[in-house]
Image (tube, grey):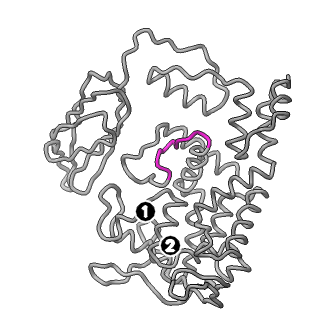
């Protein structure tokens, strides 16, 4: 809903109960705005005191529903410029800008374009010679051609290997120097060779064996306990923060304590064999130097804290646990990266968008689940995620 900054709007909240009755529960609901540009009264009246978008999360009992509002100045003299969209991104972005009565920025000149594209894709500035040649080039499609050429340069793999090494906790204290070198090299080779993202992530999630002979096994080497494995996999690959649900139902999302511990059940059987530890400080039990083997045992289950009962492994949002005879990590790897799991594709698309644009379509990259973290352009995110999957 788009409103003028001087307008107010009253949110109406109705609850349908199990007996089919419908009641107005506005006075019993809780209203929580996600931005500081509005105030909300206890009965749901929203008043803005400066322009901007805001999501008001409405809570009643265990139900949570987001209401997205935009307060935009009238701008009676606003005229939309005569612009032709170049691609599907323009289609969605122009529609939103027009709705918010904001004119698009002009297209940058060739010198600025090359500088920005080089920094985004390669992490370096173009040389003076490259810049002069690009500006002087009269080829009509030279920008697309320049991008294609950058994607094939070794600096592109270097830049994205560094980003993924950070995400996957590739650091020396946990992995030792050789482990860092091997894991980073494996990440970089995957990017340089154009390995599909779903394959890349499957190989990480199901990884076992020697941390020297099978580099992705280093992912679990740095995650020494069940909680860190469960939370990291959900956060990095699904854009979902589960930490708050470990001790109680998540206050800002749908996840319950049972969801948390059933998800954790996928990681309870990951174990380690330390073949050697040459780390000089013998008192530091969290640092290792030497080869380790990551393997899966046949025993070990998560338990529900309140009852002490076993929490059988269950995918996030699934209604039933997995087959108890299934290889847990293999089943998890297949489910996380499945084309039918939109959260995986959206998370990866949003991460790329963030690194190119400086902000995500969902602003917080690893918090898709929070009701206040709504996409600024939902249809664009859906479209990009669909293409991401369709193009392999």
The image shows residue 166, relative to residue 268, as above or below, that is above
On screen, residue 380 versus residue 109, left or right, reads left
Q: Position of residue 390 (x, y in %)?
A: 67, 49
- Magenta highlight range: 356-365
On screen, residue 215 versus residue 82, left or right, reads right
**Which label number is shown at residue 229?**
2
Q: Foreground: 285 or 208? A: 285
The image shows residue 340, relative to residue 314, as above or below, that is above
Q: Residue at x 48, y 81 (%)?
A: 268
Q: Residue at x 66, y 58 (%)?
A: 162
**Which label number is shown at residue 317?**
1
Q: Residue at x 74, y 66 (%)?
A: 185
Local packing at callout 1 (Cα closer than 10 Å; few below 14, some 14-19, many 20+) is few
On screen, residue 200 versus residue 140, left or right, reads left
Q: Position of residue 388 (x, y in %)?
A: 64, 48
On screen, residue 79 versus residue 14, left or right, reads right
Circles 2, 1 touching at the beta carbon (< 8 Å): no
Identify the image quadrant of residue 301: bottom left
Q: Position of residue 172 (x, y in %)?
A: 62, 72
Q: Foreground: 178 or 223? A: 178
Q: Residue at x 47, y 71 (%)?
A: 230
Q: Position of residue 150 (x, y in %)?
A: 78, 43
Tag 1's secondary structure? loop
């Amino acid at each position: 809903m788009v409103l003028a900054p001087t307008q107010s709007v009253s949110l109406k909240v109705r609850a349908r109960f199990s007996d089919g009755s419908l009641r107005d529960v506005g006075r019993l609901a809780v209203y929580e705005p996600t931005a500081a540009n509005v105030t909300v009264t206890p009965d749901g009246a929203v008043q803005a005191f400066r322009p901007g978008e805001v999501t008001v999360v409405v809570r009643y009992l265990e139900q949570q529903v987001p209401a997205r509002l935009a307060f935009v100045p009238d701008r009676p003299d606003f005229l939309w410029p005569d612009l032709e969209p170049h691609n599907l991104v323009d289609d969605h972005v122009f529609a939103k800008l027009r709705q918010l009565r904001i004119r698009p920025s002009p297209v940058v000149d060739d010198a600025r374009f090359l500088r920005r594209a080089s920094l985004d894709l390669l992490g370096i500035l173009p040389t003076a010679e490259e810049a002069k040649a690009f500006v002087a080039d009269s080829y009509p499609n030279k920008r697309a051609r320049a991008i294609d050429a950058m994607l094939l340069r070794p600096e592109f793999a270097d830049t994205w290997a560094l980003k993924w090494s950070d995400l996957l906790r590739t650091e020396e204290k946990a992995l030792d120097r050789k482990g860092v070198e091997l894991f980073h090299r494996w990440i970089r080779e995957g990017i340089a060779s154009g390995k599909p993202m779903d394959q890349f992530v499957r190989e990480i999630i199901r990884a076992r064996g020697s941390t020297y002979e099978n580099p992705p096994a280093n992912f679990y080497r740095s995650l020494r306990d069940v909680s860190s494995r469960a939370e990291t996999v959900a956060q990095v690959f699904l854009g979902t923060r589960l930490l708050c649900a470990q001790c109680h139902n998540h206050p800002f999302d749908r996840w319950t304590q049972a969801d948390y511990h059933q998800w954790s059940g996928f990681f309870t059987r990951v174990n380690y064999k330390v073949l050697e530890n040459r780390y000089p400080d013998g008192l530091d039990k969290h640092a290792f130097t030497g080869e380790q083997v990551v393997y899966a045992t046949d025993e070990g289950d998560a338990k529900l804290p309140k009852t002490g009962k076993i929490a059988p492994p269950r995918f996030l949002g699934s209604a039933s646990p997995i087959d108890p005879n299934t290889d847990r990590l293999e089943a998890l790897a297949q489910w996380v990266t499945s084309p039918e799991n939109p959260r995986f594709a959206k998370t990866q698309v949003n991460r790329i968008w963030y690194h190119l644009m400086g902000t995500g379509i969902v602003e917080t990259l690893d918090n898709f689940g929070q009701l206040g973290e709504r996409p600024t352009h939902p249809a664009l995110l859906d479209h990009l995620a669909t293409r991401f999957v369709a193009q392999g």
